[in-house]
Structure formats: C-alpha cells, structure tokens
Image (tube, helix red, strand yellow):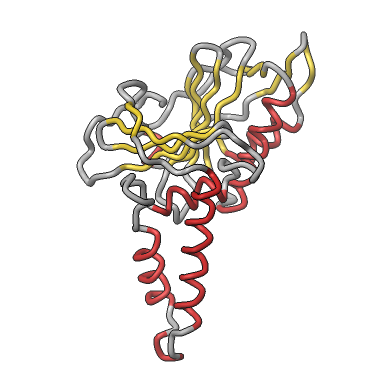
C-alpha cells in the first residue's frame, strides 16, 4: 500500500528551526544506512510523524516534530530529497517553511504501520545507560566471536548467523530484541550519558515500542499481522 501524493506546492511549517534540525539529523542517519531510503510522513494534532526503516535492524524508526499548521496529511517521499528540502527551509512567521519533494511509490513497509492507540506501558525497561551497555556488550561479543572464527568459516553467512543469534536476544525480561535497542542507539535516540529521562517501553497488539525523548523504535513481536493498521503511532 502506498501513501497518496501531496498536492503541488504543498509545504510544511515547523514550529521552529530546532524542530527541523532534529529531524534533519534523523534523516541523515537513515541515509547513512541506505542512500535510497524513503520516509512516510503523516501529520495530525500539530505534529509531523516521520517513519523510516533502517536496513538490517528490522525495525521501524519514528521521529516527530511540532508544526505550526497541518500541511500535508500523508505522503511517502525520498529521505534524501526531504533532507535537502529541510536544509533549504526558509524562516517565516516564527517557523520554518519546507517545500515537500514529490511523492514516491513506497516499499511494502510503508503500508504497514503500528496502531495509533491501545499502547500500554511494559515494566522492566532499564535506563538509557544500561541499554547502551547492553548494546556495547553485544557488539563486543560479536567482534570476539568473529575474530575467533577459523579462516574456512569466516564467511558472510556465518557472520550473519552470529549476528542474528546475538541481536535476537531480548533486553532483560522486557521481550524487546537487542536489535531494537541497537537501532535506537545508532539513530541517536538514546541520547547522551548525561540525559536523565529514561526510555519507556510500550506494547500494543503484535508490536513493542521503545520510546525516548528523541524518537521511537517499533518492532513486531510475532509473525502474525495482529493489530496492524496504516495509522501512525
């Protein structure tokens, strides 16, 4: 399923330059992992939600930004072109006006987004420092096991097998795969060590959502498409 294109000349007006800057940093990280990345944009309640899917992590990443008006309601665009448009935004009336690039036909994930409501908090989520520590330990284990492989087994398939084993483990008793925490750190969502506000874990239907003040990572927890919709979280 693909999102509808915006009308010609459609614009977004961000509440301030800081909102746009945070979004630009998120887009840059997505493009780092995939130069052909696309993002789905949805607006509602004065907020823009930007959905992306960094490859290899098998998660959806969500970054939000405050708007001064609704602008476009639903469109899928090139992440690179949108990043360029944000960089070229112009100040107007205390906000930042950004011209949207043309809509594109999105990959399958753009038509299967998490539910809007029904999220419940899951207990046991460690703080950001502990989450970063778990990712660091997993990276160190992967490197150690990779270096210990004999030459005849040092193949892409064997490295992928080790990676799947490590990153499919869960964070403590939360049920959240470590790959989701790794994605959150790689996208800058876990923040700096000095940030006090802890991440929060939510569940809804067949999804888990790791929320932080900088963005969210959402992952499906089962093979069945339970509770899926095309509405934003």
In-image side of 158 versus 44 (left or right): left
Give the position of the C terminus as an image quadrant: top left
Which quadrant of the view contains residue 14? top right
Which quadrant of the view contains residue 102? top right
Q: Residue at x 41, y 45 (%)?
A: 59
In-image side of 149 versus 64 (left or right): left
Point out residue 35 in the picture as x, y percentages from the top left corner. Answer: 59, 51
Point out residue 212 in the picture as x, y percentages from the top left corner. Answer: 52, 34
Q: Would you say residue 104 is visible in this rendering?
A: no
Establish if 180 lies above or below 23: below
Q: Residue at x 63, y 18 (%)?
A: 12
Establish if 151 lies above or below 224: below
Q: Would you say residue 87 is visible in this rendering?
A: yes
Along the line of sight, the residue nearer the viewer: 1 or 32: 32
Q: How many marks?
A: 0
Give the position of the N terminus as an image quadrant: top left
Along the line of sight, the residue nearer the viewer: 148 or 102: 148
Point out residue 184 in the picture as x, y percentages from the top left corner. Answer: 51, 45
Q: Residue at x 53, y 44 (%)?
A: 128
Along the line of sight, the residue nearer the viewer: 211 or 80: 211
Point out residue 29 in the picture as x, y percentages from the top left corner. Answer: 61, 46
Q: Residue at x 36, y 51 (%)?
A: 172
Along the line of sight, the residue nearer the viewer: 157 or 171: 171
In-image side of 56 versus 65 (left or right): left
Residue sticking out furthest to the right: 91
Establish if 77 lies above or below 32: above
């Amino acid at each position: 399923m693909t999102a509808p294109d915006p009308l010609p000349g459609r614009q977004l007006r961000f509440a301030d330059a800081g909102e746009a800057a945070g979004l630009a940093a998120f887009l840059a990280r997505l493009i780092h992992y995939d130069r052909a990345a696309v993002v789905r944009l949805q607006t509602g309640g004065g907020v823009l939600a930007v959905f992306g899917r960094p490859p290899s992590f098998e998660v959806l990443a969500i970054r939000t930004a405050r708007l001064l008006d609704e602008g476009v309601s639903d469109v899928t665009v090139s992440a690179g072109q949108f990043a360029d448009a944000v960089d070229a935004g112009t100040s107007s009336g205390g906000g930042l006006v950004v011209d949207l690039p043309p809509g594109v036909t999105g990959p399958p994930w753009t038509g299967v987004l998490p539910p809007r409501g029904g999220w419940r908090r899951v207990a046991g989520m460690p703080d950001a420092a502990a989450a970063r520590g778990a990712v660091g330990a997993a990276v160190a284990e992967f490197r150690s096991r990779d270096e210990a492989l004999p030459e005849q087994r040092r193949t892409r398939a064997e490295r992928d097998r080790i990676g799947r084993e490590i990153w499919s483990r869960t964070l403590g008793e939360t049920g959240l795969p470590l790959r989701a925490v790794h994605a959150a750190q790689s996208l800058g969502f876990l923040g700096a060590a000095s940030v006090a506000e802890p991440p929060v874990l939510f569940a809804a239907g067949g999804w888990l959502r790791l929320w932080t003040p900088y963005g969210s990572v959402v992952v499906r927890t089962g093979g069945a498409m339970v509770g899926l919709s095309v509405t934003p979280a």
